[in-house]
Amino acid sequence: MRSSILSTAHQPDLDVDRQDIIVAPATPPGEGGVAIIRLSGPNCLDLVLPFFQSSRTFNRPDSHYFYHGFLLDSQGHRLDEVMFVFMATPRSFTAEDVVEIHCHGGHQTVEKILSLFLKAGARLAKAGEFSYRAFINGRIDLSQAEAIADLIHARSATAQTLAFSQMEGQLSRTLYSYTAKLRDSLALLEAWIDFPDEELPTEDMNEIKLQVSQSINELRVLCGGYNTGRSYVEGVSLLLFGKPNVGKSSLMNALLGEERSIVTEIEGTTRDLLEEGLVIHGIPVRLIDAAGLRAGLDPIEREGVERARRKLITADLVLLMIDGSRPFDQEDQDAADACLDKKHIKVITKSDLPLEPSVEFSDIKDAISISIKSGEGLSLLRQAIHDAIIGHQSRIDNSVVMTNQRHYAAASHAMVSLQRFVDSVSLGFSLEFLASDLREALVALGDITGETTTEDVLDSIFSRFCIGK
Ligand SMILES: Nc1nc2c(ncn2[C@@H]2O[C@H](COP(=O)(O)OP(=O)(O)O)[C@@H](O)[C@H]2O)c(=O)[nH]1
Ligand SMILES: [Mg+2]
């Protein structure tokens, strides 16, 4: 990063004074039509107004109206022509008073305006501090704050849709409806704990048990969508695997629509791992082209083959590629054997050439035939990749989808506690024990929305945000 005011910003130690006025560019660094500088904090309008010369006369700008004018430097000289908007608390991103200056894009203008406000008493915002304030001030919960980061980093249209619905609070509302019911059950239990001489009526206990079982089922459905959600948001890695010259690099280029990998008739052309991102049916995919599997003599190629084998272990999905125009041989068999325990799709390449009988009669079944020359089979292959990752029905349109590993871990924890509750009821455990299982489940669920999240976790979540978010 080039030297600038921003490079002095630290990672958040978010235990900061919320009376401070914070400032940061809300737009990315670099050249562009417009840059936005955002300030947040009590009375930040008073800090900015002396530097704003409006082209209209007013005493004070109205909230949520745009004003045209000039920004003046500390000597009163015009520094830039800007648009100015004030958003009064609580109707702003942070729920505090917020001012946004839309100035001309570009490093120098942004730096000058920033240093003007810093000298006037604002402090440079830490990474994620605007979102953190929105969270601390109760305007959004933690899962919504995390969704802002997901939205910004979304790598596919579906990931964007999922992040947006989470930011709008779809996951939060679902969780609140679960926790509200669990809280009612807990309150009932606790009421009876206060009267140790009396037994909780059986029908009340049955009612609570039913309620908890229902919550377990609801959480199971929610967690069941996690793998799908994660694939859409984080993406998957897809390894092209097979002996030399089966057409791995050709397929990589065809899927990418560009000549990324070198394609030749010479075996062992690809030696290093080549990785490229693309989107297949809404799923961000990291496509990996590797050296062809063979007993190479050359140490560089041997290392390439080693890397391909290591990738085979970590890749989410493998395309096992067999050349349909050449005899099926030991190297093909070795590649197929290496994929046995791995989620993979069998692909027979070069279908524009006559199919070699030994391939036809090998035990490579359910393969997809493709040809890079004619384009045959490529859309079928894309669909097969999607289905292998997501499964045949992906019901992500109307249901709440969990996409975040942290949320998944917390919901799973809650399910375990609730199951223990149900088991303990059957075993006739005391109400205190039962109540503590319910409490544990509520704490786990509260971790998702941020009600019970520790400072450390908050720090690590918000530090992944960029400055100005
Ligand atoms: N006829 C035909 N040749 C192909 C096809 N795909 C790749 N090839 C050729 O097969 C050779 C090896 O391809 P390459 O992609 O480098 O294979 P890799 O070693 O597995 O990466 C090249 O000469 C390609 O032009 C195809 O679908 N049909
Ligand atoms: Mg290659």
Image (tube, rainbow, N blue to C red):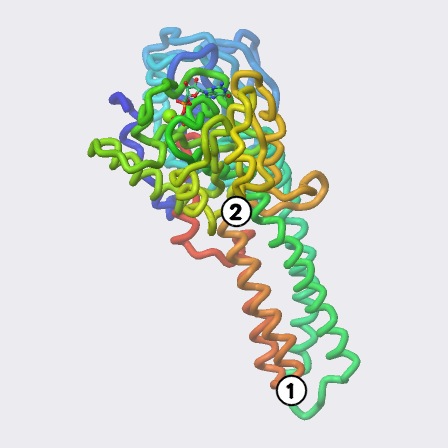
* 296 shown above or below 422: above
Q: Is residue 56 left or right of residue 19?
A: right
Q: Quadrant of ligand 1?
A: top left
In the shown orientation, is residue 376 left or right of residue 302?
right
Asked if one can make out residue 90 in the rendered structure from this viewpoint, the answer is no
As helix, strand or loop, the secondary structure at mark 1 comes to loop
Report the quarter where the N terminus lies.
top left
**428 is higher (above) or lower (below) than 357:** below
Q: Secondary structure at mark 2?
A: loop
Name the residue at 76% across, 84% down. Answer: 201
For residue 424, which quarter of the picture?
A: bottom right
Q: Residue 157 at what x, y percent from top left?
A: 59, 29
Residue that protrudes farthest toward the front in the picture: 357
Q: Nearer the viewer, residue 318 or 246?
A: 246
Residue 443 spot, x, y in % from top left: 54, 63
- Of residues 292 and 445, the one nearer the viewer is 292
Q: Nearer the viewer, residue 250 or 63?
A: 250
Q: Position of residue 150 (x, y in %)?
A: 51, 37
Q: In the rendered structure, which amino acid carries the disc numbered 2?
A: Asn
Work out whether 384 lies above or below 34: below
Identify residue type, mark 1: Gly
Among the two numbered marks 1 and 2 on one chain, the one whose residue lies closer to the N terminus: 2
Disc 1 and disc 2: Cα gap in Å? 36 Å
Residue 320 in sight: yes
Q: CB under 8 Å between callouts 1 and 2?
A: no
* Mark 2 lies on residue: 404
Q: Which residue is mark 1?
A: 428
